[in-house]
Image: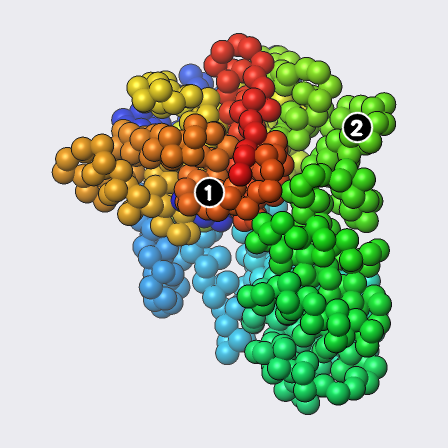
Amino acid sequence: MGLDILRDTAAAGRARPAPGPALRRQALAWGLAVALGLTGCAAAHAPTADDQAQAGEAAAPDQAQAAPANPVTARSGVVVPDVPAYVPPAARQAVTDAYEAVQKRRWKDLDALAPVAAADPVLGAYPRYWSLRRQVQDRTLPTPDAAVRKFLADHPGTYLEERLRTDWILALVRAGNYAQARQVAVPERPAAALRCALLLARHMTGQHARAAEVQDVFEPNADCWGLLDQVAADHVLSRNELNTLLRNILESGRSGDINRMAAVVFDEAAMVQFAALMKNPRQWLDARKALRPGTETELAAIALSRLARSDDRIEAAQYAQDRWASRMPKADMQWVWGQFGLVAALNVAPDAARWYRLSGPVPMTDYNHAWQVRAELRAAPIQWNQVADAIRKMTGRQADEPVWRYWYGRALAAQGNQEAARQYFQSIRTDLGFYGQLATEELGQLPSLPPAPGPLDPAWVAQARQNPGLRRAVALFDQGWRREAVPEWNFALRGMTDAQLRGAAEFAREEHIYDRVVNTSLLTRDDVDFSQRFIAPFEGRVAAQARRINLDPAWVYGLIRQESRFITDARSRVGASGLMQLMPATAKHVARKIGMKDFKPSQVNDFDTNTVLGTSYLDMVLRGLDGSQLLATAGYNAGPGRPKRWRAQLQAPVEGAIFAETIPFTETRLYVKNVLSNAVWYAALFNGQPDSLKARLGTVSP
């Protein structure tokens, strides 16, 4: 349950009702001119030099081009020229076969298929890219520099060109060819791995990295570890800076990353001690008679922080206070108490705020600062001055996020500073998410739909239909290759105006790629089109099913928008399937409970089956959680037992917004806030009236 569909790398299928989309794809394959009512095919966008180069790639080399028809000029002034769209069937089949060859690691087959596939004007570059990527990433093979340069020259400005450039730079740095790596043009938006590789290349060619740069780019991945090993050996980072990196990674709980970082920080002898304290911190501490400053003190701080995970945290804290507080530097003990607070908060324990208050002003990670605020919100009674103090400990960047601006405004209001609180609420009321909606209600109003933008000129949709990158993405979606299709689509959106983004979203709607409708529309800056952002597809069939069992259709739509973005055959990383992301065991259980005879797991992606089972399960969860949409939403994602346990640990009734913000699972916390925020907007769209988020959240009692 709980597909985080905002991670666009999920390998889910594409929802496509029949027979309309099949006919549309056939029309696309043989030329979009017929569909547009034009003599020739319409173009992607007002042509630039790059666009014309891409349009040239789109023509099959042996396909005679018809004389171009007169370009169409829309009211907006956008020119829609002609682009041939014929795809030779043999070439497309070669692309399909090449994809299978990649999956089965049949590299000779791939290399043989690539020249045949090249005749496909839409997807023909992919087999060649897959072949080059394999050669570039295989360290046992020489880097095919000439072939890579040829590919980059043949496909300028495309997603695959940028992707191969990234692969090439990474391979060069890994091979120690630092100077050559620095000569390759850097992609526009380098990911963390590439940023680390580029910084290492610069460092190794005489422009030494600075500690702040390393800390800024570092994430635990292979290329960043390579950078860190080198700069640590070159003493770029101080001992305290290395210790901070290790402390931060300890919070992740990922043992592989923790041990890898410890190996950078500590020498071989200290690593033996580190392994011992991670296994049994109390035993390790009891064996220490005296501490030498430096490594031993740092190891002791880590060991004390691990006591927070003891079965008896109160006794462990007393041990730390009585035996160690006087022996440790004050700042180190404050960090230890911050770790006690974090572990307690993640277990929704009532004593979390008490430990956090012992942490003083010591800097913590953004993650830990956020949990200090949540611990204070969950305390009974809430001490709003402590909430405000915890937010003031954050960096300015973190404190400026809508969530913390809202809670800081609430803290100010509770302390009597109504005017300052109002200014904080006013500053985020235009945010269309959870906390913008709550801030609007604090100002005495209900969230209202933003003004609808003007009608979309059809030429922008025609332009999107002929955008080479979007067309490649649609073809990839048609193949069922979502992992390749999503980044291709997203790359094509770069630099688009609001009108172009709305046109692309409408193109996605025509193609029934509903997740791209929503995610593309979310990128507009001024023209906010809720008919796209909060699309309600399937012609009322979801709402009808919700009403059949007395569920709120707006809530159901809000949940589906978050679960699957309306992809009927979506599949999550944990095996949840379909529009409402049902786990196999859940689907079987619900089918049995509602008397759905002859149910088979293979039916779970069927639209009607999935919505009947999903809404029935949601209704069961709702009834088991006292009719609370807040608790039921959390239960649908994390299992109905968990919100019961989180609720049981409350010391007093709390408002729903506090319960939502203090859910200890990050995925579930974000999920709940998004679903209920979505429901507010769907209710306004369906009913034509503003809706209250606070009313949906309600109050949660122990």
The percent position of residue 505, horizontal first and vertical second, equals 52, 28
| Residue at x-position 38% and y-position 40% | 581
Looking at the image, residue 277 lies above or below residue 457? below
Query: Considering only order in the chain, which callout, 2 or 1, is on the residue closer to the N terminus?
Result: 2
In the image shown, does 580 or 57 lie closer to the viewer?
580
Mark 1–mark 2 distance (CA, rounded to whole Å): 31 Å
The image quadrant that residue 604 belongs to is top left
Give the class, few, some or many, for how many residues have Cα within 10 Å of label 2's Cα (few <14, many ≥20): some
Based on the displayed image, in which of its 4 quarters is residue 257 positioned? bottom right
Residue 403: x %, y % from top left: 69, 37
Colour convention of the picture = rainbow
Relative horizontal placement of residue 545, taking residue 327 as reference (left or right): left
| Residue 520 showing in the rendered view | no
Give the total number of marks visible in the rendering: 2
Q: Residues within 10 Å of mark 1 (few under 14, many from 20)?
A: some
Q: Quadrant of the N terminus?
A: top left
Q: Residue at x 31, y 49 (%)?
A: 93
Q: Position of residue 21 (x, y in %)?
A: 33, 28
Between 652 and 182, the one lying in front of the other is 652
Residue 256, relative to residue 651: is it above or below?
Answer: below
Question: Which residue, given by chain and number where applicable, does mark 2 sit on?
Answer: 413
Please tell me the numbered disc located at residue 644: 1
